Image: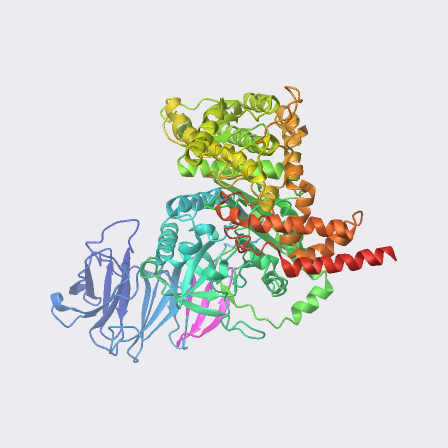
Amino acid sequence: MDAPELLSAFVAVPDLVPGTRGSGMVMNWQQQAGVMYAGGNSSMLRGWNLCREKCTTALPTQTDSCVTSMASDDSIPGMLVAGFGDGTLRIFDSRSRPDYAVKTIMKEHTSWVVQTHIYAGRNELLSGSVTGELKFWDLRYPKTSVKSLEAHRSPMTALAVHDYAPIFASGSHNQFIKVFRSDGEQLALIRYHEGFLALSIMSALVTVATCNLNQWALDFDGNLERILESIRQAKALGARYRVGPELEVCGYGCEDHFLEQDTFFHCWESLEMILRSDVTNDILCDIGMPVMHNGVRYNCRVFCLNQRILFIRPKLFLADDGNYRETRWFTTWKSGMGKGNARGLDKFVLPASLQKLTGCVHVPIGSGALSTLDTSCGAESCEELFTPDSPHVNLSLAGVEIIGNGSGSHHQLRKLDQRMDLIRGATTKSGGVYLYSNQQGCDGGRMYYDGCAVIVVNGQVVAQGSQFSVKDVEVVTATVDLDDVRSYRGSVSSRCEQASSLDTVIPKIDVEFSLCHDEASFLQPTPAIDVHYHVPEEEIALGPACWMWDYLRRSGGSGFFLPLSGGADSSSVACIVGVMCHLVVEAANNGDEQVIKDVQRIMGTSEQEYQTLTPADLASHVLHTTYMGTKNSSAATKKRASSLASQLGCYHLEMGMDMMVDAVVKTFSLLTGKTPQFLSRGGNIQQDLALQNIQARLRMVMAYLLAQLLPWVRSKNGFLLVLSSGNVDEALRGYMTKYDCSSGDLNPIGAVSKGDLKKLLRWAAVKYNYPALQTVEEAPPTAELRPTDENAGEEADHSQLDEEDMGMTYGELSYFGRLRKIDRCGPYWMFRKLAHLWSHLTPTDVATKVKRFFFYYSINRHKMTTLTPSYHAENYSPDDNRFDLRPFLYNSLWTRQFRSIDTLATKLEEKKQE
């Protein structure tokens, strides 16, 4: 064969503008006319007669955008269709005057037109844009397209139409080729296309990320920044898949704000900002937010990749017990998802701004999964893990290998064990990778979300985040081997049998993206680790400490005020503030910028460079305590309060309340002519209680006065939050004065039992070197509201003992509380259970204790309606706000119930004597 010879050469586009973002030069050849059209980074389309090498036509494009493709049909003389970088299509008639050559402008594409093709003799046009969208046009009516097809979800790079067969093919940025019939039906899928001499061997190793986020209800800007930071950190650690907490965009605790359109509007705003940034490039992100579809509110997971939304997965089962009220705001997804039914997906219409941004009008919504080039991913959300028929079961059987769980799970003593058992169990039977993400912190309510993000592979924990922390963002990653999952699953024959006969269809959305690293990455799977659990004493200290820190910094307060009596309850609260100072100082000294910023605001040193602190340094600014003694107080409690304050390093005052108490009693006497006396001084029980309550209520009044003015006294700005210190047992029994020191702004121990508080004091005395706590723990509980025994020594404890006043022990109160709430027992059923549990007592004695408890519980129930918001820690909390919904006006005689108890007690006594 002879060597080719150059016959001629000329410049087809003399005004071509050089650039890195343009199309260069684009050409189209019209065979019958013998004309070649050329354009590109130019404002003109030029037609050349190649026989004469002469430009015969120059058509202005009437746009600043570059020409990216051209198409013509010899059977339609003079017609030329050009695609442009701005997404427009223009139909030219070369027979018209140049200024009038543009006949039609089509604007349905929103980005770079990759290719245009006119089917010969059919007046039909096919166009495709870089967004992956194909459009079919009838050139006789070109104003609107006839049909649209989403060919790819990643950028489309090529489109080619067969000259004779009714097929065309498109290629994407992720080496993914699809072959279609001319009517748009997909015929074939070619994966892993790398091009000539560019073969790549993929491993089964994938790095995944989950996180703890300290979100705050309705703090859309702050929540957005924390989400973005978590994705940035995940990418920096090499992750290709990131899972975030439930409803992370708005915060889980929005409650009735979920009924407002504002919440949905701002969530879509935040998601748009996420997609406009580049953080979702090359990482699959599972983001939690509320979505309204067809007028119904859903709690959803939104999967995003490369600045596009792939899939919306609504929650299938909602939490509606205990503290949760999800069915008040959301609906479960039920759209035709049933046995043998593939109709689990619907089309969700994106907001207009996101349509413009992503180039997509619809995205799939429903119960499905994502199928990437190398694996498949699915999701379940919080409560779904706790249900008997969890979604992860069918997802695993359907071959989904990676399951993410975005949760909004709150702390409760000893609850983590149950949660971890369920998370590990999710992959123990069926194998798989399970990522658990959770909020962490106080997002505006009584609950503390306790983080503990984990990654589990085949039942083994390979990564675990903190349960309690003052960090805003904590990302946990692991590299997992999907071949281990496949091997694990394949080795269990019973699981394989169930998978092969699965009749629940899990629709899968194809995603042109690879999660796995290539073989040359030299990564190794993350090894299994032991799960870290905190002992209950640590949970009581760390959870409320973190909750109070969030409350303090987000409320704008300058510190706390606590009436410190020297008893177990107020000392426990002071101890928890001390623990908070340890956590905060450790984070600040380690360079946590957000913690440093908050500390400096509270200390009033924002304009200065941060200096290393000790916990006592911070406590001196944050915690203000006052011992409010009366003539009924003992020297022992005063000494314990002073010692503890000194060890904590807090600002401490001591004062006498007698002047205030005497003034109130004197005012009453002047008004009525009568002077009340304590029971021991000749008065009756009514007078005695009134005199006790005066002391308690005046302490609350003084506490709020000091909280307002102590910053001024110390030449500081701001205000103090008043801490109350009533425990769960006393609240249950009603052993407190309404509007006394049980009233305040927040209560860290309101759902903790007296027994657990005693354990906390013993533990913290050693752990944090607060030996005064040991002395407090050893002292008998006393209110110190009655005159003390005149024969008692100066250092002796008060003779008024709580358990004697209540007529029951704190241990018995814990029994009553658990049976009443956790076991859902009324008076009669509680007696039935305790008659067997307390076999050391006679049935009559048990009956007396049960009836006494319910009598005092019912007459004091009204006190629960005004209790200070408290940290939720126990399942038998009597919190009236949302957790323990009961009447506050009872028939305290319980006539039917107590009569039934007496009848059964008599029968049991008779049976015992036989």
- Provide residue 719's location: percent of width, then percent of height: 39, 31
Whether residue 435 sits left or right of residue 714 in the image: it is: right
- State the residue lying farthest toward the front: 673
The residue closer to the viewer here, 553 or 57, is 553
The residue closer to the viewer here, 644 or 630, is 630
Whether residue 715 sits left or right of residue 790 in the image: it is: left
Residue 213 visible in the picture: yes
- Provide residue 558's location: percent of width, then percent of height: 41, 31
- Provide residue 800's location: percent of width, then percent of height: 63, 32
On screen, residue 706 above or below 191: above
Residue 560 visible in the picture: no
On screen, residue 529 above or below 324: above
Residue at 63% across / 45% down in the picture? Answer: 462
- Provide residue 824's location: percent of width, then percent of height: 64, 57
The residue closer to the viewer here, 42 or 274, is 274
- State the residue lying farthest toward the top: 794
What colour scheme was applied to this rendering of the protein?
Answer: rainbow
Whether residue 597 sits left or right of residue 818 in the image: it is: left
Total marks placed? 0
Quarter of the figure with the C terminus? bottom right
Quarter of the figure with the N terminus? bottom left
**Is residue 603 inside the magenta stretch?**
no
Whether residue 243 sits left or right of residue 64 in the image: it is: right
Q: Which residues are magenta?
A: 169-193
Residue at 60% across / 38% down in the picture? Answer: 540
The residue closer to the viewer here, 173 or 502, is 502
- State the residue lying farthest toward the right: 914
